[in-house]
Image (cartoon, helix red, strand yellow):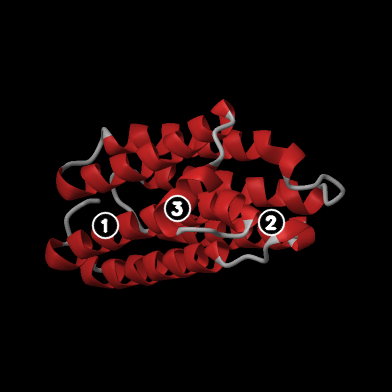
Amino acid sequence: MSGRARGRSISVAGVCIIALGAGAAFMPAGKTISSDMIGAVLIAAGLIETIAGSLRSDVRSMAMAAGVVTAVAGLLFILNPETHLFPIVWPIVGWLAIRAALLGYAASHVGGSVRTWMGLSAGMDLLLAVLLIAGLSVSTIIVSIFGPTPELVASFAWILAASFVVNGLMLLEVASCERSNGASA
């Protein structure tokens, strides 16, 4: 597959991940959010990211592994539906931390703007994991920036949304590099 074709495919993946992020931001508020819904979003994002990672040159295995980790986190939600959202924070922390490590490592093996965006994606996931570990309510940050927001949307859904949007933007930058010169990304 040519660099231009890979670039187009990765670009579509990036847009799909951003769309999932937007969808995550608007998940239902309150305790009506289901484990299956969260799991489905994570699995979809993981599959898209794994496919996009398979199109990468230099960091194919790391990019694919980040997608697999996302899909596995989604499976945890679907396979254990009795667990409600708040007690299952630790698998989400693990997902974010593992993704941060994989993307951070992969960023050290690429250059230019792709390195920057991979670092930003890794940094966002690490920051979100640290916020969850510290117990800092993400809703406090969201309410400070956007005003009153339903509690669940302002916390967990925004964690998914933030991770997905930055990851999608990173994929768009990878796609741009692939299309412009077919360079390894």
Tell me the residue at 22%/41% (across/down). Answer: 110
Tell me the residue at 23%/49% (across/down). Answer: 114
Amino acid residing under circle 1: Val
Q: Secondary structure at mark 2?
A: helix
Which picture quadrant has residue 17? bottom left
Amino acid residing under circle 3: Ala
Which residue was labeled with disc 1? Answer: 174
Which picture quadrant has residue 124? top left
Of the two numbered discs 1 and 2 in the rendering, the one whose residue sits closer to the viewer: 2
Q: Position of residue 59 (x, y in %)?
A: 33, 43
Residue 18 seen in render:
yes
Circle 1 residues within 10 Å: few <14, some 14–19, many ≥20: many
Which one is in front, 149 or 22?
149
- Marks 3 and 2 sit apart, C-alpha to C-alpha, by 17 Å
Of pointers 3 and 2, the one earlier in the residue sequence: 2
Left or right: residue 103 versus residue 34 is: left
Which one is in front, 160 or 154?
154
Q: Secondary structure at mark 3?
A: helix
Circle 2 residues within 10 Å: few <14, some 14–19, many ≥20: many
Amino acid residing under circle 2: Gly
In the picture, the disc for residue 162 is 3
Which one is in front, 76 or 38?
38
Left or right: residue 179 versus residue 138 is: left
Of the two numbered discs 3 and 2 in the rendering, the one whose residue sits closer to the viewer: 3
Which residue was labeled with disc 2? Answer: 39
Residues at marks 3 and 2 touching, judged by CB atoms closer than 8 Å:
no
Residue 167 seen in render:
no
